Amino acid sequence: MYKTFGWNVVFNLFYIPGAFLGALAADYFGPRVTLTVGVFLQAIVGYIMAGLFEHLSKHIAAFVVVYGIFATLGEFGPGDNIGLLASKTVATPIRGQYYGIAAAIGKIGAFVGTWVFPVIERNAGGTDTVSGMQAPFWVASSLAIFSGILALFFLPPVDQDAMQREDVAFLQYLADNGFDISQIGDGSLGKSMKGEVEQYEVVTDEKKNDSDES
């Protein structure tokens, strides 16, 4: 029992460097790129684990290290950045609802996975066979590739001004559709955001005039 506990401790330690490195990478390269790189690398390690599972299962230290790297990359990419993207790609007034929906979908996915993966293992031969234990890694790695493609081509780039741009775009949308944005919150939010919209329009007009003159 103490050996099992010890190896579990070693494995869980791999989460820490992934979280730290992912935070640093997201600051330099942006969360979209970091997420994409993380899941692609995680998929590669997952495929390696699936292909070499029969050998890794006979060497617990090697298995823990490779599986730990798999977990590290999970924290580096999606672990650090899915929440960040969910909170920075929407305007302030609806951020809570938006993030709540994103979190709920994630929980549903986790719940479904607890039921689906045992079925995958059984259909692949059961947990007593090598093929049965390989199957979850094949599937998980393929899903990682799929999510990486979605992130790369469909997620917007997020920088330090992303939330401000979303606020401006949202307020502009409301204003264009006849909503009184001065009543948002206690009124101060709407007024300040209206000022941002006006400032944004001035900057946009100046850039347009400069391009017309050139």
Image (cartoon, grey):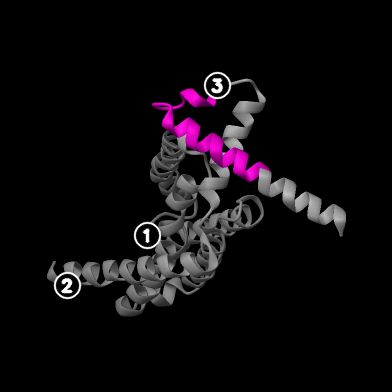
Q: Nearer the viewer, residue 214 or 96?
A: 214
- The residue where tag 3 is placed is 180
- Which residue lies at the image location 45% right of the left edge and 44% below the top edge? 116
Instruction: Give the x, y percent position of residue 152.
Output: 63, 58
Q: Report the residue at 39% width, 26% height from top.
A: 186
Specify whether residue 185 is painted magenta: yes
- Quickly name the residue at label 1: 128
Q: Percent position (x, y) of residue 20?
A: 36, 69
Q: CA distance from mark 3 to mark 2?
A: 64 Å
- Between disc 2 and disc 1, the foreground one is 2
Q: Amino acid at mark 1?
A: Asp
Looking at the picture, does residue 37 appear above or below residue 198?
below
183 to the left or right of 142: left
Q: Which residue is painted at 12% across and 70% down in the image?
A: 2
N-terminal label among 2 and 1: 2
Viewer-nearest residue: 112 or 178: 178
